[in-house]
Image (spheres, grey):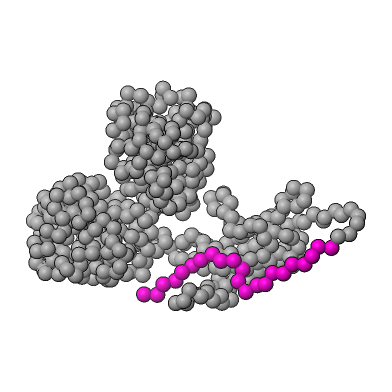
Amino acid sequence: MKKIFLITVGLAGVLFTSCDPVMEKGTFDSPLITAESLMDGATFAQFDAVTDNDGNVTYTPSEDGNYIQYNFPNVAAVEVYYEKSGEKKTLSYGRSGGMIYYLPSRGSDPQQTLYFSYANNDGTQVVAQKQFKLKVAQALDPAVKVLVSNKGRKKWKWMPTSKENGAVWGNGKYCEGDQDGSLDIVGAWWGCGVEDGTANSKFSSQTNHTGGRYEEIKGECYALSYMEFNEDGTLTAYGPDGNKINEGSFVIKDYNKNEVTDKDKCSRGILETSAGAILWPFAINADGYQPTSFDIGWLDAGRMILWASFSGKPYEEGTWWSFMSDDDAEGILASHDWHWKPTEKNDGAVWGNGKYCEGSQDGTGVINGAWWGCGVIDGTCPDTFSGQMQHANMSVFNEGEVYAASKMVFNEEESTITLYDNNGKQIRQGSFSVDMTPNAETFSVGTLSTSEGAILWPFAINQNGFMPTKFDIGYLGSNALILIYGTKPYEEGTWWSFGK
């Protein structure tokens, strides 16, 4: 399969030279640059880039290329940026010429405006703009986007359930009831889990279901094994070492996240694959049979539950698979509304303090490192937000944001967070970005950056109304979002707990 690597690079094939300055006696007044004079003599060219097997990049002129070469001969340096949801996104600064890479978000208008900013010696800033026609990836079908993300590819791995202390595959009564995406598998009788997991039974003890092919596929039975769905319709399975196990194809049909589309099968749609394409592709008690049509019991950006029946008859034995994805942070955040999620701390606390960097989070309701917490006004926690006004910035606080029905709504395309009170009325709106680079030192799986005050009750504890704009993501999954703010390891930090 052809692979294309897109990278941001500096100006290629252009030689920059310098000369010794000439000193003259006298007084100089540098002329002020205007937006018009900034563009005088400016040049622009667009290119496509192709990387060969040796990693060498070739640039080819293109009318809609996403690599843009620019040069402003009248000034020493410009800042190049675009705007998204009213926020400036810088592409380059500190030089008067170079090459930038700009790929608009999927489904955007190909006509895009770039801005070029220059600061005069007197402190005034001028901004010129220019439109470019760019290549834009076509908007994906909503069902396909859930599987492959806005990037066009997405990893799915095993998700341990509450069955058998962590089972990920097993049998049960086919069409017993609707799945809700939780760790419970409605209708499950039994299940086994990954080799390096906690389940009572492991895949290695269930080789009788593989039709004698266990030795060929055992690499898919570990916590780090995964499948990658691609927008071109391919589905590739990998072992824990990253080596390819199998490659097939997939099609998704009649998917509806919000409701069951086939009442007789408790199904929200159908996932069709080539035989053996998914991880551990065997129906239970079927002598190695590999289904090619799976009922989607549940599917959102971070959670997938599949069912298949050898007989196809409701209420007889069926097989279930449990998967998750943490490879699509923006998609998971935008997949549903986020409300306060009560934890085990203080009988339902949702916000509080604790030791920063105490340990990792698992999203199950226990906040690792928590010392204390308070809860929503209409919840079970004995300490509620109403008694914690000393932590709030009253110019930002809205009394409607501290109830069970208060919510945050993330918009992936616009990079916005919109807050609503307990009556559904909009409170305020901000922006966000996500960097899912783990940090072992802070036990975070990534970082959520926001504009000030963008989340519910956005205040750090014991800091006189201070509102952080950068949060450690302790956990992010379909059912839980744990945010943590701190500055010094093992000193006091603040935690927030959100869920569906």
In the picture provided, is 108 more to the left or to the right than 252?
right
Give the residue drawn at x 34%, y 31%: 349
Give the residue drawn at x 79%, y 65%: 20
- Residue 142: x %, y % from top left: 36, 59
Q: Is residue 20 visible?
A: yes
In the picture provided, is 366 more to the left or to the right than 102?
left
In the rendered structure, does residue 255 fall within the stretch colored magenta? no
- Residue 5: x %, y % from top left: 46, 69
- Residue 306: x %, y % from top left: 22, 57
Secondary structure predominantly adopted by residues drawn in magenta: loop
How many marks the image carries: the answer is 0
Give the residue drawn at x 44%, y 71%: 4
Q: Which residues are magenta?
A: 1-22
- Residue 300: x %, y % from top left: 31, 53
Where is residue 221, by image quadrant? bottom left
Where is residue 69, by image quadrant? bottom right
Give the position of the N terminus as an image quadrant. bottom left
Give the position of the C terminus as an image quadrant. top left
Where is residue 74, by image quadrant? bottom right
Residue sitting at the far right = 26
Q: Is residue 428 visible?
A: no
In terms of depth relative to the viewer, which is nearer, 56 or 393?
56
Up the image or down, 9 lies above or below 265; here it is: below
In the rendered structure, does residue 13 fall within the stretch colored magenta? yes
